[in-house]
Image (cartoon, rainbow, N blue to C red):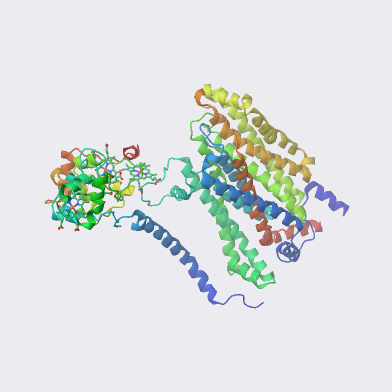
Amino acid sequence: MAEEKDKTKTESPFIEPGHTYGSITDKISSMILTRKTPLGWFIGFGIAFSLMMVLLFSITYLFMKGTGIWGLNIPVGWGFAIINFVWWIGIGHAGTLISAILLLFRQEWRTSINRFAEAMTLFAVAAAGIFPLIHMGRPWLFYWLMPYPNTMNLWPQFRSPLVWDVFAVSTYALVSLLFWYTGLVPDFGSLRDRAKNKFAQKAYGILSMGWRGSAIHWHRYETAYLLLAGLATPLVISVHTIVSFDFAMAIIPGWHATIFPPYFVAGAVYAGFAMVLTLIIPLRKVYGLQDFITIRHLRNMAKVMLATGLIVAYGYMMEAFTAWYSGSEYEQFMILNRMRGPYAPVFWALIICNVVVPQFLWFERFQSKVGALFAIAIVVNIGMWLERFIIVVTSLHRDFLPSSWGMYAGTFWDWSIYFGSIGLFFTLMFIFLRIMPAISIFEMRTLVKGSKKKIEN
Amino acid sequence: MPQLFHPSTNTFAKVSIFGAIFLIAAVLWVFLSIERSSYVTQAGVVREQPIPFSHRHHVSQLGIDCRYCHTTVEESNFAGIPPTKTCMACHSQIHATAEMLEPVRESWRTGKSLEWIRVHDLPDFVYFNHSIHVKKGVGCETCHGPVGKMALTWREKSLNMEWCLECHRAPEKFVRPRQFVFSMDWHPEIDQKILGEKIVKEYDINRLTNCSICHR
């Protein structure tokens, strides 16, 4: 025992020893089928649901009054809606990275968190998708974004990055959904077989699409899953690259930079891992999943966060450097205005959140302390939101012409919609936890062999 | 465990996959059709007017020229709707006591204009001009249809942007010699393709598809 403890300290396994095929299936399916729903679930769901109602109320009011209820005005015509959109889309990226790229690289540790992270991706994209739509003057005409033979004989402006966005995000949502669902099919089969009441049996039966677990089924499943992973992989890079084009294609100082795509992608993964940690730390506590989601998982995620955080920090540095090196008066003014202008406190808060605080992750002490990790993850979430705020607002509020300068601040409705979207995200997350296996049952079973070996030697 | 589903669900599942594709295609088609239907565009819908004024009567049977009533069609963007005075020029004699024409006489006595219900009405963000079309040889009939056959006026075309563009992209398919602009039932004596190209050259007609031609 003592020896084993020692080993877990150096390299704790991906699944705590002692689990068998049966015990894994029991444990995960009991979260949905037999165990009483924990009190934490009800409290969390209640709060999230109330926030979602705030969102619905605010959007209704927005549709009645128009975007004038927001803080938007000239010169800052892109406010919270775009900030929140980029923030949410970024959060989604960790899910795809974990499920697709880590799958292709055969990183076994993804197994216990991939299902959950993919769900997070979907719900984050859903929350993100709201913002461009409600940002329109006439949201009921949203379908004009699509190329179809309309009565105006018009196609969307294919040279506009905002149109690329539509395709990038909708492809992303679709592929993520398919990937997530395909992964769920075998588990729906297990749940169908274990469910006690008729309704659950039928529901999981339909969702499992006649899964019987035959060799042919598994063969097709493996092929499909691998193909989807291949499809999803480029999306991790492309989606946020295109989101960054929304800015980089414009000639506004501070936006028109070639560093934007890589720097946005790294930022997305950074924010995404922060969100996974934010969600998974309470989850494993409430459901007692410490033996499936071990400290080693948390540490791995912390390392990814540290690495992407450093890339983001490099991005900030390069923004300042190119502004100086370009010799462009406007670029230089923009950077100085960020650091010393009216939004300077926000900028420095962002630097503290995104660059300074994550440096604690260099130390193993912080990597494996759950409370510290949780706190750092929250700080990074906030930091990434501030980053988008700085990018959107500081570039716009003081552009080329001093006579057109102005200030921007969110109104009550800006904030209520932002917090409401968080409510939407968590509501979906809680429903998912209640009715679907948050951890992939059959993939966890493939880890059992490994953990047994560890006990043996 | 007992069978959850009847074996026929297998077939049902397979059919539903293909069915979904057709369903999506059908829904799309329905929406596109609705968008162009007369329910949305109001094309072909006869409007009730305060007085049942008949173009068939006054244009085809009496042979009155459009410009007698729509006086500004040649020099202005607005074609013009005849004032009560124009009607009274004849109707102070013809049908001078007819019940049907009472609103006209009342308008004449009180000086209050007749309130016709508009049949064509472009959105305010579109700029349209009659005079250029008349000068470049686009017949009233091309856009307004067989007005001479209308007992009550209806809108012949959808007035959608795609309709304007259909002509602006290829005016040679629609133009006619100037002297026939006001005629109803005109047909080209030679092939429209040859005639159209000749007219386009002669009248120097351009293809105006720039957005700011119509949205200024």
In the displayed structure image, the side of residue B15 where residue A360 appears, left or right = right
The quadrant holding residue A442 is: bottom right
Placement of the N terminus of chain A among the 4 image quadrants: bottom right
Placement of the C terminus of chain A among the 4 image quadrants: bottom right
The quadrant holding residue A81 is: top right
Frontmost residue, A94 versus A445? A94
Q: Position of residue A378 (x, y in %)?
A: 71, 42
Q: Position of residue B74 (x, y in %)?
A: 20, 40
Q: Residue furthest left?
A: B189
* Residue B212 in view of the camera: yes
Which residue is found at the position 53% from the left and 54% from the top?
A174
Which residue is found at the position 20% from the left and 44% from the top?
B85
In the displayed structure image, the side of residue A138 where residue A194 appears, left or right = right
Frontmost residue, A367 versus B144? B144
In the displayed structure image, the side of residue B50 where residue A383 appears, left or right = right
* Residue A105 in view of the camera: no
The quadrant holding residue B148 is: bottom left
Q: Position of residue A450 (x, y in %)?
A: 74, 57
Frontmost residue, A341 versus A327? A341
Frontmost residue, A166 versus A266? A166
Q: Residue furthest right?
A: A2
Count of picture labels: 0
Asked if residue A248 is positioned above or below residue A187 in the image, the reply reads above
Q: Position of residue A73 (x, y in %)?
A: 52, 34
Asked if residue A442 is positioned above or below residue A402 in the image, the reply reads below
